[in-house]
Amino acid sequence: MTNSTKIQGPIQGGKYGWPFAASMLDMDTLDYSEHEYFLQGEATRFRMKDGAEQDRSGFWQAESAGVADFKTRFIVYAPRNPANFNGTVVLTWNNVTAGHDLFQADSKTIFENGFALVCLTTQKVGIEGLPPLHQGLHGWDAERYPDLHIPSDDLSFDIFSQAAELIGPNRAVEGIDPMSGLKVERVVAQGASQSAGRLATFINAIAPIRNPIDGFILQIYFGSGTALEVGDTLVDINKPLPGNAAKRLQGKNLLRDDLGVPIFVVNSELEAIACYGVRQSNTETMRFWEVAGTSHTSIQGRTIRQKLLDRDNIVSGKVEPAINAIPISPVYDMVFQHMHCWLTDGTLPPEFPAIDFEGTPPSPKRDKSGIATGGIRLPQVEVPVAKNSAIPLSEDIFALLGGSSFPFSPEQLITRYGNKTRFLEQFNNAAKLAVTDGAITSRSLSDIVGEAARSWDAIIN
């Protein structure tokens, strides 16, 4: 971080009067504040050292390659009462796969357990958007975001580092303090999908040089870091490329294990397939979870996201009703709690078996209902009403991410369970076991069981 780095805010006004993609939750009810800030300064570019490669080992050797100016934004969600703060800040690397910022500000577990959440725009696409829609910050609200600029994604790694330092335990609290004087004790980095790939590169290449992060959470991670250098390219990972989409997503590198900080990877069945060749063992500083029967996205997740997109007048693709119907979000919520305990009192998260694979090329082993065996067994997998999997409905990249869900017939349900009462009894037991095992939070129980009852009714009636 340079001496020229500045923070401006809280930011007000603009066309809409709220930050792009702000949480849909009621902050007053949660007793949290929501403030947006601008971050401006110089950021360092990085490149691989001469003769070094971003190889499978993950022990990458990078060096600085100059600096450039930038100005970006971040949103801070923090408890209004300092006594309710648990000391952990989750710093999110905003995902830009859709051509605009996406981030996880809808987790009630984050807010109910006293975390602070910081959502950072780190990449060029987040500001400029993708053609032809250009739904980045500039296009969405030119009044609120007139002069934000990230000239290259090459700067993103240092922008992330600078933000971590400005919200962390050793920040300078004179002047504008985005954490409002809270006693921050640790910063956890979180990224999903494309952002998880960028965090992988941060872990392997940047953290050995400078690491203000106390723990890393990589969600739905495809097993490959992203390039350090892309120049001024507007990165669009959805751009059609030659070859099968599934083959292009095969994992290529390990995550280095010498940083001395916890790394938590939590994957659906789809990323388990991608990561099969680069799976890593559980250690004192590594957890690698795979959740059977889930996919990269779910109908529930897309439905929730659609409400936010509708509020912000963002154009998106339609929600395909036949995609996977097991949300992985309850597992994400549990991972936040495990990471907090891992860092505060050294309590290691539980270990779970990996998803079973067989055949050549390897693919998930499936039971007679077509559901993957092994892995974390959510109640929707242990006591199913449908065949949920990462098997796509077509070869399109978006179909690949959605997987599929095929409900059982009424006859199949009656044969399996006899009646709704017996089904719900078994489902409840499986759900409580998932809580006891540490796979999901107890607060998710009522939602999961309620949805199971509705799914039964939808099939039988």
Image (tube, rainbow, N blue to C red):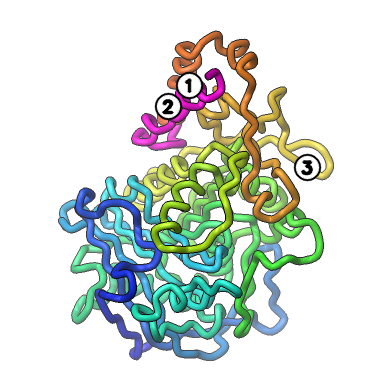
Q: Is residue 448 visible?
A: yes
Q: Residue 41 placed where, x, y %?
A: 39, 87
Name the residue carrying label 1. 427
How far apart are labels 3 and 1 at the CA level?
A: 31 Å
Q: Earlier in the sequence, mark 3 or mark 2?
A: 3
Q: Which mark is residue 362?
A: 3
Is label 3 or label 2 in front?
Answer: 2
SS of the residue under disc 2: helix
Q: Residues within 10 Å of mark 2 (few under 14, many from 20)?
A: some
Q: Residue at x 45, y 89 (%)?
A: 69
How far apart are labels 2 and 1 at the CA level?
A: 7 Å
- Magenta region includes residue 460: yes
- The kind of residue on which mark 2 rests is Val
Q: Which mark is residue 263?
A: none
SS of the residue under disc 3: loop
Q: Residue furthest top?
A: 418
Q: Residues within 10 Å of mark 1 (few under 14, many from 20)?
A: many
Answer yes or no: do the residues labelled 2 and 1 have beta carbons within 8 Å? Answer: yes
